[in-house]
Amino acid sequence: MIPEYFLRKQKLLAKIEGESLPNVGCALLFDEDPAAEIGSNCSLRIYRLLTSDEEYSRDKLKEKPTSINGPVEEQIHNGIKEVTRLLSDATITVNGKSKKIDYPAIAIHEILVNAIIHRDYSISDDIHVRIYDNRIEIISPGKLPGYINTDNIYEERFARNLNLVRMLHNLPDPVNHNIGEGLDTARNEMKKLNLVEPEIIELKNSVKVILKHKRVESLREVILKYFGDNPDSFITNGDVRNISGEDDVNKVKKAIKKLRTEGVLEMVDPEEKSYFNYKYKLSEK
């Protein structure tokens, strides 16, 4: 049992009809089922989608979505465990072979923590974590807080849920350091793996953060690096898109065409009529 004087001092009680009762922050921090206590959806919904398409149907779900409830600290730890589990066998296919997809664990941690501590708890909705074939999307309810926007989000600080941020920071092993470093850390960790920085999109009533499995290198560099590691192999347009994370078929097509014009690549079978079966290898000239 948490002493009432502690809760009062930490501003975790509300006066209702003369009685001191736990407020939303208190329920989020200590209740085993905060969603039931505050009468509003405030859990995590995590699911793996076997597609890269924005529009998807239920048959693209790898398994039933996982709902994670409980105190927010538990949500953070259990959410990261579930994302890690779903990513453990996530692969891309290159030249008919499966290759594991790697995302920096620290980046996932920081984005998930940010979503939980800065979301708008007045909106009855869960945080949705969608794991696609080529990206992770974390959608949290509510617009960006205060004066924060997508242009200044890395430079400015504003906490919508001050008590929640402060209490989590004061835990023995805090999930956040409360110095505004979360997004910067995520961006730096993506950079270490040569992945593009997180994309932050403010929607009508939510914020979406996207971690793309997309390389920083140009398509030319991606292709040449592949053949540097696999000089006797071949590559297809689809392989290049899988390796680089670039979704645009025509951009990849142009990159391959330029390398062919330069005499770097040539077709494996010049008589092949179907574009979808085109394969390219290093030129023998």
Image (tube, rainbow, N blue to C red):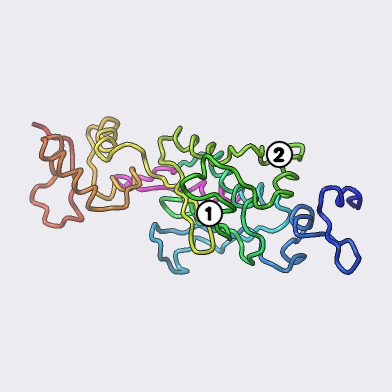
Residue at 76% from the left image edge and 40% from the top image edge:
171
Residue 161 as seen in the image, left or right of residue 110: right
Cα gap from disc 1 to disc 2, whole angstroms? 21 Å
Amino acid at dot 2: Pro
Badge 1 crowding class, 10 Å Cα cut-off, few under 14, some 14 to 19, many 20 or more, is many
Is residue 34 positioned above or below 243 on the image? below
Task: Indicate the quadrant where residue 99 lies.
Answer: top left
- Secondary structure beneath disc 2? loop
**Left or right of 42 on screen, residue 64:** left
Magenta highlight range: 82-101
* x 8%, y 31%: residue: 285
Q: Residue placed at 46% from the left, 54% from the top?
A: 201
Q: To which residue does mark 1 refer?
A: 138
The mark nearer the N terminus, 1 or 2, is 1
The x, y position of residue 120, in whole percent, is 63, 59
> Residue 272 appears at what percent x and percent y?
11, 53
**Above or below 231: residue 201:** below
In the image, residue 25 lies at what x, y percent? 75, 55
Checking the image for residue 174, the label placed there is: 2
